[in-house]
Image: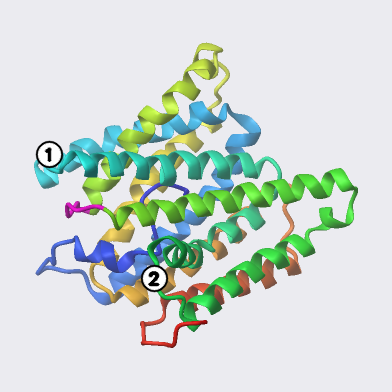
Amino acid sequence: MDTHPRKAATPSDAATHLPRNPAAPSALRARISLCLAMAIVGSSVVAGKYVVLSMPVYLSLWLRFAIAFAVMLPLLFLREGGLPRAPRTDWLLLFAQAGCGGFLFNALLLEGLRHTDAPSAGIITATGPACAMLVSCLMLGERLTRRTALAVCLSFSGIALLHAGNPQMTASAPARQITAYGTMLVFGAVMAESLFLLLGKRLRTRITPLAASTLLCGFCTVQFFPLALPQLLAGGMSGMSYADAMVIAWYALGITVGAYLLWFSGVAHVRGAEAGLYTGIMPVSALLFSSLLPGNVIGWQHAAGCTAVLLGIAAASLPYRPAKQLQ
């Protein structure tokens, strides 16, 4: 996921937790904030590709969440007066959410980026809304409507197009296996993000997005520490270059903190269905940023896969109308 608080499948839920400000920004300003947030989120795939090629992965992720937590905790105390009050079960659910949306999402995504190209990974992560709908149907017993089925089919078709059109699929059997393995890992990250959303529905306490995001960063800092410690003791930071430090700073302050502030400053002032449509900017942003990396060429399979996924996001974001349950 990328695990930072950008869960696009629940913008309407997030909006209900935010107070309406009489001095609300204009509709145009809110939409610009949403666009910028998703554009920043798209860069996370490129940053992740850089991390797996140049830096100790778990040490980098630990630094990312530790820095973000150090920034967001004082902000939480300034804006909301401190940590939220919640029963023990909700604290356990929040810890489990961090494990799915922060720990598993990032670990699987970055491991998948070792075996697949950044443009494909960016498009696969955009299937999150459809996957969240599918998980809700399977685990919460929600109705599988025709719209849900259409969104899921379109999103999975996008993944199939990426996989079939990848040049490595015409290469040797080992190369094909590596590509398939990378696709499975990135898709596993998407499913972990969907579980994050599912666990969020179990919370009994109304927790603001700022508080939830701060706690997520804090819990992820704890969860990544056992894996980061060996890399730290092995001198993982001794060879860190200026470029490495800038990538970690962008990961923590830009993607984790900045995208959050932009997203939730805009999502409170637009309809939930409309906010969901802005998640379609993320795969496009990921494609554009990925084209800047050496060796990444945007081909027809990326364009076709991106189109299918965007159509799936649009289908998932349409206002709900009662529909017949599929038999």
**Mark 2 packing: few (<14 Cα in 10 Å), some, or many (20+)?**
few
Q: Which of 295 and 217 is in front in this view?
A: 217
Label disc, if present, on residue 82 of the rendered structure: 1
For label 2, the residue is 142
Q: In this view, does 122 lie above or below 315?
A: above
The range drawn in magenta is 203-208
**Mark 1 / mark 2, whichever is N-terminal:** 1
Kindly give the residue lying farthest to the right in the view shown: 172
Image spot of residue 318 (x, y percent)? 41, 81
> Does residue 110 appear left or right of residue 195 in this picture?
right
- Camera sees residue 26: yes
Q: Nearer the viewer, residue 79 or 155?
A: 155
Task: Please report the residue visible at 66 percent of the width from the left and 71 percent of the height from the top.
Answer: 157
Marks 1 and 2 close (CB-CB < 8 Å): no
Does the magenta run of residues contain 85?
Answer: no
Kindly give the residue lying farthest to the front in the view shown: 327
Image spot of residue 42 (x, y percent)? 51, 56
Q: Nearer the viewer, residue 47 or 164?
A: 164
- Mark 1 to mark 2: distance in Å? 35 Å
Task: Please report the residue visible at 49 percent of the width from the left and 41 percent of the height from the top.
Answer: 104
